[in-house]
Amino acid sequence: LPVHESVHQQERVCVDVLRPTCSYQSIICNFHRPKTGDALCKECFFWAFEEEVHHTITAAKLFTPGDYVAIAASGGKDSTVLAYIMKLLNDRYNYGLKLVLLSVDEGITGYRDDSLETVKRNEQQYDIPLKVVSYEELYGWTMDRIVQETGRKSNCTFCGVFRRQALDRGATLLEVDKIVTGHNADDIAETVLMNILRGDIARLQRCTALVTGSEGAISRSKPFKYTYEKEIVMYAYFKKLDYFSTECIYSPNAYRGYARAFLKDLEKIRATTIIDIIHSGECFSVREGIKLPTQSTCECCGHISSQPICKACVLLEGLNKGKPKLGI
Ligand code: SF4
């Protein structure tokens, strides 16, 4: 629980009340918000958290009434809070959305099978229908088998490429208008760092966008773009949401883990690091005349790709030919 212990010892009244009609003036402050440092009681924190997400959604006009929206659901804290809050805001502000949970089963025994059980409970708890698509049915491979073939160095490359496409394929099957994902501010800052470290200017340009994929593909948005991971954990904890918190069994070698550790170190020195890095990412622009990949469709599977053959098809061909390093 990311609440600083000393805060509990302070007997302060909730003076930083944000809610317009707060009836909690007499309640002792529980903690300081990691994002702003405001001393808040629990109820005011919930209100501030929900209103900020609502503001992100409405300021960017992410939805129009009648939209059929798939919530990418893994059972983890981010997507569980996202499902909960999408339902809450849809009801509170009459967005007029039809919601569905969309999960991808990568076939990771001891991880995804357990987390999918959480999503199935969320389906009942939030009364939002669930659709699961699996790597096995889409590609004929599970991640467990891929790791057997390739070892544990490039598992996340396969998994990330396949998941991105699997989500699109699931969304196409459901015929939804839009996809929302639980990517939070920390995730986006990590991605900015990773793209700088790799020199991937095409992705660097796109990774801070609130909405992506509107050209031809089903658009994806990130309502938690400005939401700190710590606050998502606090929200889930205090709301007693049912989420799955175990790490993927193949994650220790993930490149992202190093970027995350670096970000945490920076945050200790400078509290605004996450938002600063997102802002930096937004400010990067590519010099005129630099050729960037253009989005078209894969000649093999017909899904969105910046190359004649998409990365998923190249990786799959390598696996099927017993040469898994082919596409890496
Ligand atoms: Fe897939 Fe890697 Fe994430 Fe595990 S850590 S779910 S292998 S991308």
Image: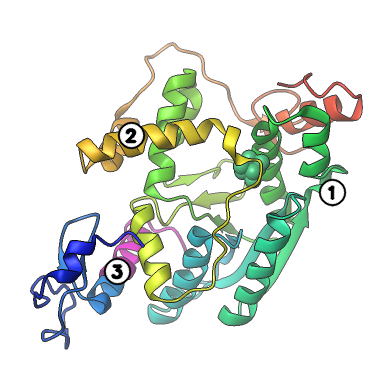
Left or right of 149 on screen, residue 249: left
316 with respect to 187 (left or right): right
Instruction: Give the residue number, with chain letter if any, for mark 1.
Output: 136
Q: Quadrant of the N terminus?
A: bottom left
Quick check: 51 left or right of 85? left
Which residues are the magenta region? 48-63
Name the spot of residue 239 as percent of width and height, x first.
Answer: 41, 76
Q: Which residue is mark 3?
A: 51
Q: How many marks?
A: 3
Q: Which residue is mark 2?
A: 282
Dot 2 or dot 1, earlier in sequence: 1
For residue 168, side relative to residue 58 (left or right) = right
Q: CA distance from mark 3 to mark 1?
A: 39 Å
- Identity, as a three-letter code, of the amino acid under mark 1: Glu
Foreground: 10 or 160? 10
Q: Do labels 2 and 3 touch, CB within 8 Å?
A: no
Residue 303 on image: x %, y %: 73, 39
Q: Earlier in the sequence, mark 3 or mark 1?
A: 3
Q: Main secondary structure of the magenta part?
A: helix
> In the rendered view, would you say 280 is above or below 86?
above
**Which residue occupies 31% across, 73% down?**
46
Q: Residues within 10 Å of mark 3 (few under 14, many from 20)?
A: some
Q: Secondary structure at mark 2?
A: helix
Between 111 and 101, the one lying in front of the other is 111
- Mark 2 crowdedness (10 Å alpha carbons): few <14, some 14-19, many ≥20: some
Q: CA distance from mark 2 to mark 1?
A: 37 Å
Q: Secondary structure at mark 1?
A: helix
Report the disc number at residue 290: none
Secondary element at tag 3: helix
